[in-house]
Every structure is written in C-alpha cells, then in structure tokens.
Image (cartoon, rainbow, N blue to C red):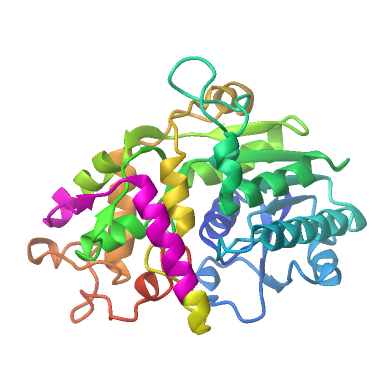
Amino acid sequence: MKALVVGGTGFVGMNVARSLARAGHDVHATRKEHTNTLFARKLGVPLVRADLDNEASLVEAMRGREVVFMCAGHYPRWSLDPEREVDLARGRIRRALDAARRARVQRFVLTSSIATVGPPRAGERSDEDDPIDPRALRSVYHRVKLAIEEEVLGDALDAVVLLPTAIVGELDVKAGTGFLIVALANNKLPFFVDGKVNVVDADDVARAHILAAERGRSHARYVVAGHDMTVRQLLERVAERASVPMPAAVPGWLAAFAATFAEMRCAAARDGGRPFLSRELVDVVRLGQWVRGDLAARELGLPEPIPFEVTLHKAWSWYRRHRYIPSAEGDRHGPDSPRPNSTRPRGDHPAFAAGPHG
C-alpha cells in the first residue's frame, strides 16, 4: 500500500512506519517543522513536513497516498482549560479529515486510546461496546480522545479506529507509558497510584495498524490489548530488574489533587514546564480497567500478544542503549549495553525534563 503516517516522529508513528517499511509497503511519514527527527531518520522512511494546524500542508503530504495512519492529534499538555483543549482537538482532526478527502485518500486509520472505553457491563474485562465512564468526562485527556473519535466516526470518510492500551516498547523517545519504567529504574519515582492496567507491545500495536488498513470494517473500533496487570505488579517487575526499592503507593484522589496543584504552579510560573507527574497519567490509572481484544483477533487476525516479559526486555534494552536508564555492572558489556561513559542519563534528560508525556 501507499501509506502516510501522520505523526511519524512520535512513539506510535515511528513503530507503525518501521513495520510498514519492513513489510515492503511504500510509506512516507510527517514531521513538524521544529520536531526532533534523529530517531525517525534512522528508519529510512521519507519525512515530509506537515502540521495539523495547516490543512494545505496535510493535503500535500497525503496526495498520492492510499491510506493515512493518523498517529498524531491534539495532546492536552494541561488539564486546566478543558473546553479549549477539546476545541483544539476537534479542529485539528477535522483539518486532517478534510485534507484526506481533498487528497482522495481511500482509508483513514486513527490511533485512539482505551481511555474511550468504560467499565465492563458484564464480567471482569471491557470491550469496544462498553461506553466511557461518566467520571472520565471530568478528565481532559479522556474528553479529548473521545472528541477526536466522535469526529472521525461521524465523518463519511472510510475510517477505522484502534484503541490501544498502555504501550511499551522501542522508540519511546519521550518516555510515555515508559515514564514509569524509566523513572523507577533511576530511583526517581517517589510514589505511584495503583490500579488496573493492560500493557501491550508497541510491535503488536504497529501490526494492528497494518491489519486494520487491510481488513478492518469501516467505522469499526478495535481494542488492541496485551496483558492485564496492576500498576504495582508492573513496577515490581521493573524494581526487581533494576534492583531498586519499590516506591510508596498513594490514593488516587490525593495524587490527582497533587498533580492539578502542580500544574497550576507550572502555569503560574509561565516557564513552559510541566509537573513531574501529570494529571493525565493519574487519571489514566485511576480510571483504568482490564480489557479483551477478541474483536481484533477475530476480524483483523491479530495474533496472540507478545509475552510481557519479552516486551519489558525489549523496552529495557532500548532505554538502556540510549541512556535513559543505567546499565548494571554485570551486563555492561552485553550486546544491548550502551557504550562506555554512557550509562546514566543526564539530569536534564528528556525523560525527566519534559514529564511523563512531554
């Protein structure tokens, strides 16, 4: 297929672009003007400039492409002005949809989030048919994701929506979900909020995108699931691997209050910074649930998820290779180890300077 990955320098976008290229597809990827392209360039995928605030640039990037993988979108960096964030999200996805129509794109695959799926109406696990929890509408992140989905599913364009869970894997340059892994491995996670989480390998998510383009039903939503666990269980495996102590658990309500207060302080400072722990990350954990990906397996042919230990090993090796986490003395000379004098991240490493989703 002739594909365009919008958001080609992001975590999901780079994994999708890499998988498409490896499968022999003709793929281009977009970049914004001032975005770091160091890792994206190494993939060997042509990069074109486009911006969600510039419809003409999107049309130009999409022209001649059969499928657009929308791995970008408005990402709310703050939770203090919900209406503004939702309006920005709707405007940007509308420009992308209009551009796809003008460029005569045949299929539009949206990377959404499990955040738009609510608690299970029956059993222990949720699926695509479980509506969003009303409590989640107080979360800016959840409202933005829902708004983007509503625009895509309400459009006449042939579109498929993917709902990945917490993604862990390689190419996580800004340490998204991997923030917990990176921070704990460096013994810089002072506390955590326990809750239900499902962790999926970035390679499984990329594979799901290709299958959605090839086999997905128009206007269908597919949960892309991995393995159910608790945040505590995830961190215990990381702590064991890193040989660091577990941080203390705090109630979700207290963490939400602290995160909101920290955002208010950062906003008042007007320095462009973000708090160490964002309100979005707290909300995702507080409102998390276990899920099943039966529909994706049945209709897309998505295989069994990669074992969690394999996923953690791949992510760990990538973070270590790129100095996000220290290398243990015992495996300093292993095949995945970083070069000498590169075993610890600097104090201003992006994983800590920008916050969990900077």
In the image, residue 29 lies in the stretch drawn in magenta: no
Q: Which quadrant holds residue 214?
A: top right
Residue 331 in the image: state x and y as whole percent: 12, 61
Q: Which quadrant holds residue 91?
A: bottom right
In the figure, is residue 1 to the left or right of 350? right
In the image, residue 243 lies in the stretch drawn in magenta: yes
How many labels, in total? 0
For the residue pair 220 and 18, the one nearer the viewer reads as: 220
Residue 248 in the image: state x and y as whole percent: 20, 51
Residue name at image x 28 percent, y 63 percent:
183
Residue 82 in the image: state x and y as whole percent: 64, 58
Residue 308 in the image: state x and y as whole percent: 32, 39
Residues in magenta, as a range = 239-265
Q: What kind of secondary structure does the magenta stretch mostly adopt?
A: helix
Work out whether residue 172 can be spotted.
no
Residue name at image x 23 percent, y 78 percent:
342
For the residue pair 53 and 116, the one nearer the viewer reads as: 116
Residue furthest left in the image: 330
Q: Which quadrant holds residue 324?
A: bottom left
Residue name at image x 11 percent, y 56 percent:
243
For the residue pair 168 and 338, the one nearer the viewer reads as: 168
When the figure is inspected, residue 236 is found, relative to residue 343, above or below; the finding is above
